[in-house]
Image (tube, rainbow, N blue to C red):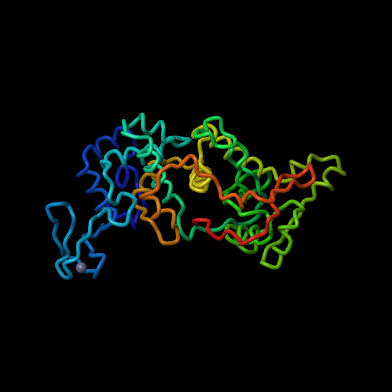
């Protein structure tokens, strides 16, 4: 009855359709385990070591393979692995993350679920976030605006005496649809605004064949040779025409300001530079599903995801804790230069391209 492969996930069948139903589905840890078991082995246990299909459950809840004697648990390799937090708490955190319009902060999660420490709540959210980026997701297509912006280091909620002004340079790519619509977006932290950083950002997030709208920054020169049509918009020409040069890339600026507002609103700006990318991933995930009506589906997706080798942050999170005092290595900020006062600030440091976009 629950063959998700034939129908796709269905509310009420594959995930709870409402908060009330959620409570009824997952009132105990055993309920949660049953659900994870069904997600992982819809046709019954498959030994991850040898592929054998017959085994038995041991007293501690793990499974023992009847062929190779290997042990496994339904949570092995997933974000729920080796956790001391009850699965009911995990599931509720996941449900809140999925169904709250703007997500949930570690502080409000801690309060809502009566979680012992802020660190625990933070780590749970960080792990849940780590599976939001689907490996191999499709790149943006059609007409895509690309620009960079500085994000972070300006929140009123920063603790630990962190100096202000530690901003990260973030690449933003947004699909534009006629006449003034906005499609999907992507955001990734960049080392700097050099071609060595911007070219991989474009190729990593935009499908070749697309028309890429940029400003006149030379870091974008040469993307034509990578299979894109470049629509270069010159701020100087716009000024000469009497147009607003900041309106040249309206979709990118709209998305960037929404992201900044979300970081300041839901998270009170208390986002560590070292973890900014995972927050950007969550923002992009939400933005790209802003019209989706079934938020319970997001719950299903997160529960059925397991960390992938192409998403290293997902496996590295189990021991990570929030570290508000951590700042970027000083060399990242060295050599920050200001372009002509009309333009955005960019770093001219050069250096290796940042390939680690986590999807
Ligand atoms: Zn086996």
Q: What percent of the width, then of the height, locates residue 57?
A: 14, 56
Q: What percent of the width, then of the height, locates residue 44?
A: 21, 59
Ligand 1, seen in the image, is in the quarter at bottom left
Residue 186 in sight from this viewpoint? no
Q: Residue at x 85, y 40 (%)?
A: 242
From the viewer's side, name the closer residue of 319 and 4: 319
234 left or right of 227 in image:
right
83 left or right of 215 in image:
left
Q: Residue at x 37, y 44 (%)?
A: 299
Q: What percent of the width, then of the height, locates residue 277?
A: 52, 48
Residue 278 in sight from this viewpoint? yes
Q: Quadrant of residue 119?
A: top left
From the viewer's side, name the closer residue of 97 and 182: 97
User: Considering only vertical position in the picture, is 13 above or below 51?
Assistant: above
Q: Residue at x 71, y 58 (%)?
A: 220
Residue ranking furthest to the right: 240
Q: Residue at x 68, y 57 (%)?
A: 194
């Amino acid at each position: 009855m629950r063959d998700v492969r034939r129908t796709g996930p269905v509310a009420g069948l594959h995930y709870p359709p409402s908060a009330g139903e959620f409570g009824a589905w997952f009132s105990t840890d055993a309920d949660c385990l049953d659900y994870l078991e069904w997600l992982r082995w819809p046709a019954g246990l498959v030994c991850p070591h040898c592929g054998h299909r017959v085994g038995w459950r041991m007293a501690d809840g793990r499974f023992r393979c009847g062929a190779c004697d290997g042990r496994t648990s339904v949570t092995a390799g997933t974000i729920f692995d080796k956790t001391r937090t009850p699965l009911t708490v995990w599931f509720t955190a996941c449900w809140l993350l999925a169904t709250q319009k703007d997500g949930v902060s570690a502080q409000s999660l801690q309060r809502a679920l009566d979680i012992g420490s802020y660190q625990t709540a933070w780590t749970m959210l960080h792990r849940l976030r780590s599976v939001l980026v689907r490996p191999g997701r499709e790149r943006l297509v059609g007409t895509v605006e690309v620009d960079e912006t500085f994000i972070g280091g300006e929140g009123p909620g920063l603790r630990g005496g962190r100096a202000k002004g530690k901003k990260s340079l973030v690449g933003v790519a947004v699909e534009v649809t006629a006449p003034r619509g906005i499609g999907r977006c992507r955001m990734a932290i960049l080392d700097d605004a050099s071609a060595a950083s911007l070219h991989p950002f474009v190729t990593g997030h935009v499908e070749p064949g697309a028309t890429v709208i940029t400003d006149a920054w030379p870091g974008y020169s040469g993307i034509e040779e990578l299979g894109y049509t470049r629509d270069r918009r010159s701020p100087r020409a716009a000024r000469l025409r009497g147009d607003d040069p900041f309106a040249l890339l309206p979709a990118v600026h709209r998305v960037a300001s929404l992201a900044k507002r979300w970081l300041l609103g839901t998270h009170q700006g208390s986002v560590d530079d070292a973890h900014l990318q995972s927050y950007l991933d969550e923002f992009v995930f939400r933005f790209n599903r802003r019209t989706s009506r079934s938020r319970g589906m997001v719950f299903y997706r997160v529960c059925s995801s397991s960390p992938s080798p192409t998403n290293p942050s997902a496996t590295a999170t189990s021991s990570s804790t929030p570290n508000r005092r951590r700042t970027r290595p000083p060399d990242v900020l060295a050599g920050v230069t200001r372009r002509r006062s009309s333009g955005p600030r960019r770093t001219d440091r050069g250096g290796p391209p940042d390939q680690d976009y986590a999807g």
